[in-house]
Amino acid sequence: MADPTIVTADPAARSAEAARLLALDGYGILDTPRERDFDEITALASAVCGTPIAVVNLVGEGRQFFKAEVGLGVRETPLDSSFCARAILEKDLLLVPDATKDPRFDCNPLVTGEPHLRFYAGALLRTGEGHAIGTICVLDYQPRTLSDVQQQTLRVLARQVMTQLELRRSLRERREEAAFMHSVLASSADCIKVLDLQDRLTFMTEGGMRVMEVGDFNAIRGCPWPDFWQGQGHADAKAAIAAAKAGGIGRFQGEADTMAGNPRWWDVQVTPILDAQGVPERLLSVSRDISEQKAVEGQLSASEARWRGLFDGMQEGFFLGELVRDADGRATDYRFLEINPAFARQSGLPAESIGQTIRGVVPDIDQSLIDTYARVVETGAPILFEIDVPGLDRHFEVRANKEHGDRFSCLFLDITERKQAEERRDAMIELGDRLRDVTHRTEIGPIAAEILARTLRLSHAGYGVVDPVRETVTVDHDRAAEGFASLAGIHAFRAYGSFIDDLKAGRPVFVADTLDDPRTAVGGAAFAALGGRSMANLPLMENGRFVSLFFALRSRPHAWTPEEKAFLRSVADRTRAVIARLEAEEQQRVLNQELSHRMKNMLAMVLSIATQTLRSVRDQGPVEAFEQRIHALSAAHDVLLRQEWESAPLDAVACAVLGTFAPPARLTVAGPPVSLGPRATLSVSLLLHELGTNAAKYGALSNGEGRVDVTWRIEVAGGEENLVLDWEERGGPTVTEPARRGFGSRLIRLGLVGTGDVDLRYPPSGFRAEMRAPLAQIHQS
Amino acid sequence: MGQSLPPASPVILVVEDEPLQRLMAVDVVERAGFEAVEAASADEAVRILESRPDIHLVFTDIDMPGGMDGMKLAATIRDRWPPIELIIISGKRRPAAEDLPARGVFFSKPYKRDEVMAAMRRFAT
């Protein structure tokens, strides 16, 4: 007998067997309890075929399971003794009239031994896909056969078994699917509801009841769904239902409380449930809880609003720009992607500049600015620079940073105040420097006006002399900015307003807008005509009288800052101080001249008295010497007077004293410039006079051809500068040292400043004297 | 008339408000060999000039009180008596050349007597 197992080594057969077993498994019938439907079929098979045994047999892996049986008494047997394992290899129906005479079964233990089966007939249980999963078979202990009707009945019963199996499988699958759908709906976090066409709630998922916090759906069943919404939500819900009823999808977002009273945000979608004809028969409403998302959105929007508020409210200008490049990749322009109101204010550009390029709004923008931003973008390194906006009178410090790609951001810090403070400080220094060297009053006004106009960006600045009685100011010089006419001329204060009353009282006047100030109510238009919409007038007082005026005008209304007022006052004060200095110097000059005049008159008187007194003296020599010494002093006074009694140049003193003794051809006066203080001027004059007198009497100037060389030099000895003056006579008669020392020789030995240090020599060639004195003493007054 | 008058000695008018200095000026004039006529003010000098046609030189100080100072006197003389020579002295600064009348000579106070005498003699020849 051949191996009854259907297990084979053939791979194709093995694969077919695996598919068959899978098909069998799909019915879930193995090892199930007995069932009446199958029992009745086996009973019917047994009765129709007249056999003691009938079985519904399912051939599994290595075993066969009897779903129903008659006359067998077991539910499962191994395959090795199975007829059915053979039967399922047959196409339709296997008929074995006498197994003992059939080579396929004559060795089967059930045939050869107990229960000594002799007859077998089995019809295949075949699935729709053609898999044979088992048989319905009849068996007998006697050899026999089946009529055609019996065989047909067996086939019909086989199909009936399959129908039962299919039915059971379908029911099971339906149950599983329903359970799955139920679990899906139940586990959804969305609130899924079904409404009838009267908008009433008819169903809600478990998950829906959870999120909606519904304890008992019956409490709300049948309630109109839109009534769960208030206000706009109610209208939105109605509209969504209408859309769904029209066959479309209704959507909205709204806020509604859960049944427990907790506020939530919902994203709602309403769709129609269509009947077989495609007509909406019910509505499906799915509400998703988006409260968290809304909260995050709210926070984001609050954060955005906060930053936007900061961005919009900050004093610093800011813009985000993006370079615009030409075909060669060179940056030729940039576009404003974002600007804040401060930037719009500072730049004077409209807020609508976003999206525009800088060349679109400022066609003649300097390319170097674009190059600067391009450098920031290309190097990634931030750049800090300063920029002047003349039209706004503002100065900014700019910080440019690369963002990403060709984008960059710029922050503008207004440093105008600091810049202007620096300018004012520099202006005061410049004013001090330039006024220091001024010698005439008329030079002061133009200098101060120029510096004022430049520093405060004035349309006019100037200085005028005031006639307080006629109430006029005469402007000689003023500084008018380009495009403004000079104000030189006589102006009547009252034509411009009433503010002269303040000026007369010594009070400065600052007007922010001449067209809107009570003090210039009558003259505002006159001011504006001159180009003065704001003005500052500072009175300069002398002995309580308003004598001159400093004025500053700007062509635009301008509230003078405390710093600017202080600056104007400082300039006026400085100017006043310089005027006072010049006046003092002028008075000093007049006083010096008067003193000198009196001194010379006094010397003239002394000479008159002396000559009158001594006219009877026989020896007139000493009288003349006296007279000449007085003249030498007088000459020194003359030189000093020319230098305002401060110092006299040594060469001028020497020429003045010696000019009377020798014609220029016989006299050399040479040396570096040395100025003598007043005392040294007098002592050096007397000294040179004595030396000249001696030369004229006894020395080189006593004949017709001798000459005198007066030279001097500066020598440094012991860290101190000394003036060394040489007196050298040549071509005169042979000289000898005088035996007697009169007043003249004693005067000579006092030296340049009365401290001695005189070396006198009498070589045959001519008298020589070398005299020294510290330069510091020479300079002393 | 066989009588011959001695040649008239040139007459010099000294104008100086300060008596002591006028004294010395007169002495200088006389030492130089001329006759001196004195005036203590410019107005007095004009009156003298109007009555004394023999004056050929006026020796005047600039700085004098009253309406007319020496410079104005000099200008007046140059205008009314053009031939009269002028020597002008002052303790103040030397006037600019264009302010001096034509042919006028200036000396600063205190002047040197010999220089002034030399100028007087020069004008007399």
Image (cartoon, coloured by chain):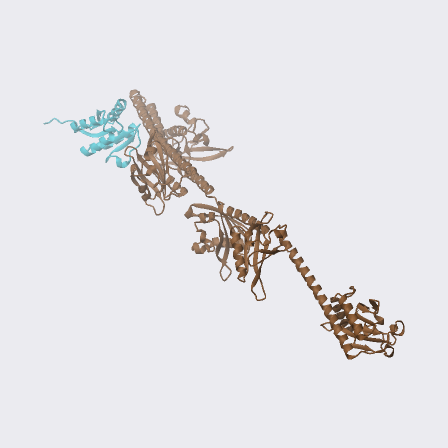
Q: Nearer the viewer, residue B8 or A674?
A: A674
Location of the N terminus of chain A (image quadrant): bottom right
Question: Percent x, y for residue A416?
Answer: 46, 43
Q: Is residue A83 left or right of residue A453?
A: right
Q: Nearer the viewer, residue A373 or B12?
A: A373
Note whether B107 is above or below A278 in the view shown. Answer: above
Is any atom of residue A28 visible in this view? yes
Q: Is residue A291 left or right of residue A37?
A: left
Question: Percent x, y for residue A388?
Answer: 45, 47
State the residue lying farthest toward the right.
A113
Question: Percent x, y for residue A495?
Answer: 29, 38
Note whether A543 is above or below A187 in the view shown. Answer: above
Question: Percent x, y for residue A508?
Answer: 37, 34
Q: Is residue A769 left or right of residue A125?
A: left
Q: Nearer the viewer, residue A762 or A753?
A: A753
Total marks placed:
0
Location of the C terminus of chain A (image quadrant): top left
Chain whose colour in the figure is cyan: B
The part of the image, by quadrant, that contains residue A638 is top left
Note whether A288 is above or below A448 in the view shown. Answer: below
Q: Nearer the viewer, residue A727 or B27?
A: B27
Is any atom of residue A762 visible in this view? no
Give the drawing colour for chain A.
brown
The part of the image, by quadrant, that contains residue A478 is top left
The part of the image, by quadrant, that contains residue A178 is bottom right
Q: Is residue A12 left or right of residue A399?
A: right
